[in-house]
Image (spheres, grey):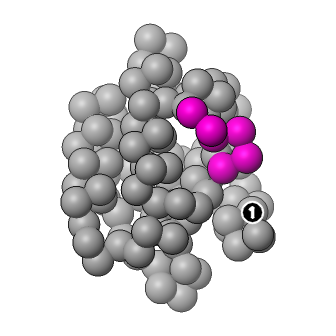
Amino acid sequence: MTITYCLNDHLGFVTINAEGIVSVDDRRAIVELMVKDNSLPNTSSILIDVTKIINPPDPNDVQAMAMLLDVLMKRFQSKIAYHVVQPGFVTPYMLASLHALNASSRVQAFMSYDEAVRWLASS
């Protein structure tokens, strides 16, 4: 399991990259680090790349994932895009975004990296 994040100054958003087997605790840990990182601008959009995660999210974890989205949306006042490549992964991520407060227009899942980046760049 590896989860990292970095500010992509060129594209203007924070990228979270996850790979391997990732648990909700792993997700929680990276969100906690990001919230405390004062070098990340509050206006940053976020691209969460889950294309290299081996295990699909457990349906029982959807609520916890939604709460993590809430935390990110409070800290960063812009959009959050999930980049997923496996169709079976889209539904749990979209369910989490539906459960998150005020996420309807701020969180989306995309199977195309380019589409995700275009959406993040749009106002």
Assign a secondary structure to mark 1.
helix
Please tell me whether residue 20 is drawn above or below residue 120 in the rendered image. Answer: above
Apparent side of residue 25 relative to residue 64 in the rendered image (left or right): left
- Looking at the image, the residue that sits furthest to the bottom is 10
Picture quarter with the N terminus: top left
Q: Residue at x 49, y 21 (%)?
A: 62
Mark 1 Cα-neighbour bin, 10 Å: few <14, some 14–19, many ≥20 = some
Does the rendering let one see residue 85? Answer: no
The image position of residue 123, as x and y in percent, is 76, 69
The image position of residue 39, as x and y in percent, is 29, 77
Start-end of magenta stretch: 101-106
| Residue 104 inside the magenta-drawn segment | yes
Does the rendering let one see residue 117? Answer: yes
Q: Which residue is mark 1?
A: 119
Residue type (three-letter) at the residue carrying disc 1: Trp
The image position of residue 108, as x and y in percent, is 68, 45
The image position of residue 96, as x and y in percent, is 56, 28
Chief SS of the magenta region: loop
